């Protein structure tokens, strides 16, 4: 693995895992007033499309990373709708 | 362009543009109590790494999409630090 690939994996890890602390915070506090409903609607749909794209094009790292992010984003979206 | 590529472009558009309504909402309301500092720290670093990866590997759509997302994410992060 060369250093460009290592940067790519670090990037994928950072952007994927970042939604975990947000999901944990939202579940714990139910404080969603500052969270944008439009953002999480777009983002959840976007990750579902990335997951579809990853599966159809056999790019499994894309599929796996977006499956994880989809779960976090969908959880935040559900809380936003329930506790707005 | 085949239908898999179209899904990929729709996915990229959705996940990139989704941070715009969040940035606008955060700038307007300065309400950042429900926003996770750890999320935006990780996510802003992640998009900076994606931008670096895109430039180094000559994957310019990756670089451009992440340059845009970086601006939105960094703005939200700055507001979170300033108005926590």
Image (cartoon, coloured by chain):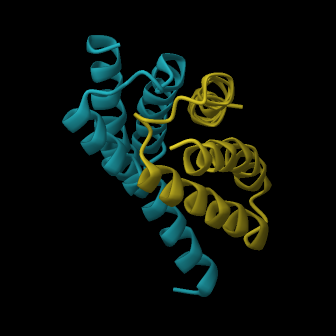
Chain colours: A yellow, B cyan
- Res. B59 visible in picture: no
Q: Which residue is pictured at 44% across the width and 39% down the height? A: A35
Residue B43 in picture, x, y percent from top left: 50, 30
Residue at 29% x, 42% y is B25
Direction front: furthest residue: A83
Percent x, y for residue A45? Answer: 58, 63
Q: Is residue A13 left or right of residue B58?
A: right
Question: Can you give x and y, in whole percent of width and height, for residue A21 in the image?
Answer: 63, 23
| Depth order, front residue of A63/B18 | B18
Please determine whether, in this image, residue A84 is positioned above or below residue B30. below
Name the residue rendered at 63%, 79% in the picture. Answer: B4
- Depth check, front residue: A24 or A30: A30
Q: Is residue B66 left or right of residue A68?
A: left
Q: Quadrant of the C terminus of chain B?
A: top left
Looking at the image, the residue that sits furthest to the bottom is B2
Q: Hey, which residue is sitting farthest left in the picture? A: B28
Nearest the camera: A26 or A84?
A84
Total marks drawn? 0
* Residue B3 in which image quadrant: bottom right
Would residue B6 appear left or right of B13 to someone viewing this image? right
Looking at the image, residue A45 lies above or below residue A25: below
Residue at 33%, 50% (x, y): give it. B21
Residue A77: where, in percent of width, then height?
A: 59, 49
The answer to whether residue A20 is visible is yes
Q: Nearer the viewer, residue B83 or A44?
A: B83
């Amino acid at each position: 693995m060369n250093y460009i690939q290592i940067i790519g994996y670090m990037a994928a890890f950072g952007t994927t895992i970042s939604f975990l602390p947000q999901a944990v915070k939202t579940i714990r506090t139910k404080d969603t007033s500052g969270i944008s409903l439009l953002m999480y609607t777009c983002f959840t749909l976007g990750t579902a499309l990335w997951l579809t794209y990853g599966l159809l094009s056999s790019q499994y790292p894309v599929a796996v990373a977006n499956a994880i992010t989809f779960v976090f984003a969908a959880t935040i979206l559900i809380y936003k709708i329930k506790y707005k």
